[in-house]
Every structure is written in C-alpha cells, then in structure tokens.
Image: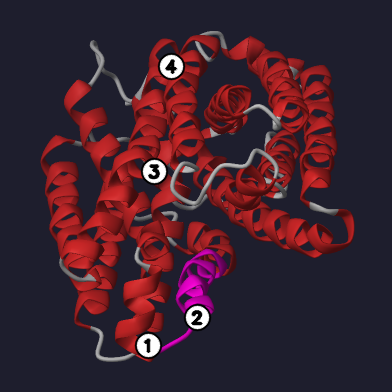
Amino acid sequence: MSITSAKIDRFPWAAMTAICFTVFATVTSEFLPTGMLPSMSADLNVSTSQIGFLVSVWAATVVLTAIPMSLTTRRFSRKSLLIVSVGLFTVSNVMASLAPNYDVLFVSRIIGGLGNGMFWMIATGYVTTMLPTRWRSRGFLFISAGANLAFIAGLPLGSALAAISDWRSGFLIMTALTIGASIGLYFLLIPVPNPHTENPGEAHSVIRDRSFRMVLLGVSGVFLVVGGGNMFYPYIAPFLIEVSHFTPLTVAVPLAAYGIGGTIGIVVAERLGRRPENLSRNIAISILYMASMMILLNFVAGSPVAAIMACALWSLGFAVTEPLFGQYIMELSSPRLRDFAGAMRTTAWNLGIGSGSFIGGVLLVPLGITALPYLGAGVLVVGATIALIARRKEGALWAN
C-alpha cells in the first residue's frame, strides 16, 4: 500500500459521511456555549464574559497542544487517533452536562480542546491520504459541509433547547452525537497507511522536509485570511443593527443569509479544487473576492435588502477560500508532513480567530464599526499576495 494514498476503486461515501457527521458533532460541541450564554450564566451564577471565555480557552488549548501532539503521536494508528480524539469530545460533553460549578466546566473545555487539536491535526491529512487526487476536492466538501451544518443547524438547535429545557440537555445530546460519531468512524472509516511506520529507524525532521517552506507559506495565508475575516465578523450583528438599522430580532435574516452563502460557497470550492495545480490561483481570486464583498457590505449597508445580499456574498467568499487553503496545504505536504501541517493549520486558524477579533475589538472604539470591513479587507489582500507568492514557488513540488 502506497504511503501517498490508500488504494480504493470508488469514492468512499460511507467513510466520508462518517467524517462529515463527526465534523458536525465536534464543531457544534466547540461552539455550543455561544448559543446558551444566558442560561449557563444564570445557572452557574457567573458573568456572561466568563461563559464566553469557555470558547476562548478551548481555542487556546488547541494553539498550545496541536503541534506538540502531532510530533508525539506520529507512530500511532491514524484511525485510532481520530476515534480517541472524538472520545475526548465525549468526555468533555459528559463533564459539562454534569458540571456542579464553573471550574469543572472550565476543565471540560480544556479536555475538549485537546480532542479538537488532535482531530484537526489528523482529519484533513487523513482524507488526503485516503483519497486519490481526483476525489480530494469532493472529500474536503464533506468536511466543510459538516462544519457549515453545525453553524446553520447545530448551534441554533442548541440555543433553542436551552430555552425550552436547560443548557445541560444540549451537552447531553452532544454526548450522544459524539458517541455515535466514534462508532461511525470505527465501522466505516477506511484505514490509511502511516508513513512514519514505513521505515521506523529513519529519523524525520519536519523543518528539513522538502515541503515545509511551502506549507509554512500556506499556513501563513490561513492565518491572514481567518484573522482578516474575524476583524469584522464577530461584530457583524452590532454592525447590521447600528448601520443597517436591523432590530435584535430581524438581524437573524442577514445572519441566515450568511449561512446560505456559506452553503453555496463550499459547493463552489469543490469545483475549484478539482485541479490541484490551479489551487493557489483560485485561492488568490477568492480572497480578493471576499475582501471586495466586505467593502461592498459597508457601501450598501444603508439598504437592508442589499445588506442581506452582501452578507451572503461575503460568506460565499470565505466558504470558498477556507477549504481550498486546507486542500492546498495537504496537496503540497509530503506524506510524512501531513499531520504536522494539519496541526499548523488548526493552530493558525485559532490564532487568526483570536487575534483578528481582538484587534477588531481594540480598533472598534477609536475608529468606529464601519472601519472594520476596510481593515479586514486590507489584511485579506496581504493573504492574497501570499497565495500569489506561493504560486510562483510551487512548481518544483508539483513536478515531484
């Protein structure tokens, strides 16, 4: 069996459906507290910001642990590690549902963050190794669909459940879903070869790997795109209320449009990812498109109808860019670097979210909320430049 990809004759629909469902369950678990802030805060007698910090500590755990875990778990079965990672989500959800106080809930989120870092350091590389080149863009479509479904359906359902019943019920349901995801992975996932067990006596330095510099360039692009987008996205609701004059109730309409745009975008990304040699070009175009839609939203914000359409178009751009970047990094990575590259990507993703939202929050007061789309778009242009630089340097790796 080649270490480049598993030998399969047809697209593994069952395996990819299991991965899609697992992504849905894990992403919903990660962001579940955001939809249940009021009830969690009241029940545990802590401030809203303390509950919001539960998402931050999850991301911080990923940033601190993903890369070290990728180096210390090299020789373990990839399939087993994926199942273990989802098992950590289950432990986190059980602890959260039974948490007698905030401290236990806090620890549960650290455990979930460990599972998150482990899952994403393996998942994209696993799909790349499992699928031949002609099917990889379709495989990344399944990953993106699971994440998108979590934001469109999983999080609103969790919020509604907290309102009807209580927030602990939400975590209990996520416990059942993550257990189901583990079972699905165990029975449906196709095992893939582990390149680190091919020559056990051979040392491998990630820094000296022939593809490391290109992967680092791609990961830098991910950081800039996620960071630029999150300079504005966390503040989209107040922007729409303040500038477009939506009410706290009607603002759900443009936010729903954002979700619809993302759904369309992941389908577009699948088509644009079918030719790996054009990935960097398509990434640069999609980043510039995303930047222009952020600016367009600012221009048309005075019209509620135009603002709704602009939200959908902006989301479409991000939904195209992110999976293309993930596929690009995996395509350029050597088989031995894929897990490390996955860890770098999820680290860059979480750093981008944290730094982008922080910088946006700092600049919000002195510059005003309408300045954020321009600032974010400027960062995105730098990300597009990174993609164009990568396009000039990638030729030798495609040749190999």
Position of the N terminus, as image quadrant, is top left
The one nearer the camera, 302 or 383, is 302
SS state under label 3: helix
Residue denoted by label 4 = 267
Tell me which label, 1 or 2, sits earlier in the chain: 2
Q: CA distance from mark 2 to mark 3?
A: 22 Å
Q: CA distance from mark 4 to mark 1?
A: 40 Å
Q: Is residue 22 left or right of residue 360?
A: left
- Which contiguous range is marked in magenta? 45-61
Q: Residue at x 38, y 80 (%)?
A: 41
Residue 263, located in which quarter of the rendered image?
top left
Tell me which label, 4 or 3, sits earlier in the chain: 3
Residue denoted by label 3 = 151
Mark identifier at residue 102: 1
Is 119 situated above or below 362?
Answer: above
Q: Position of residue 105 (x, y in %)?
A: 34, 81
Do labels 1 and 2 touch, CB within 8 Å?
Answer: yes
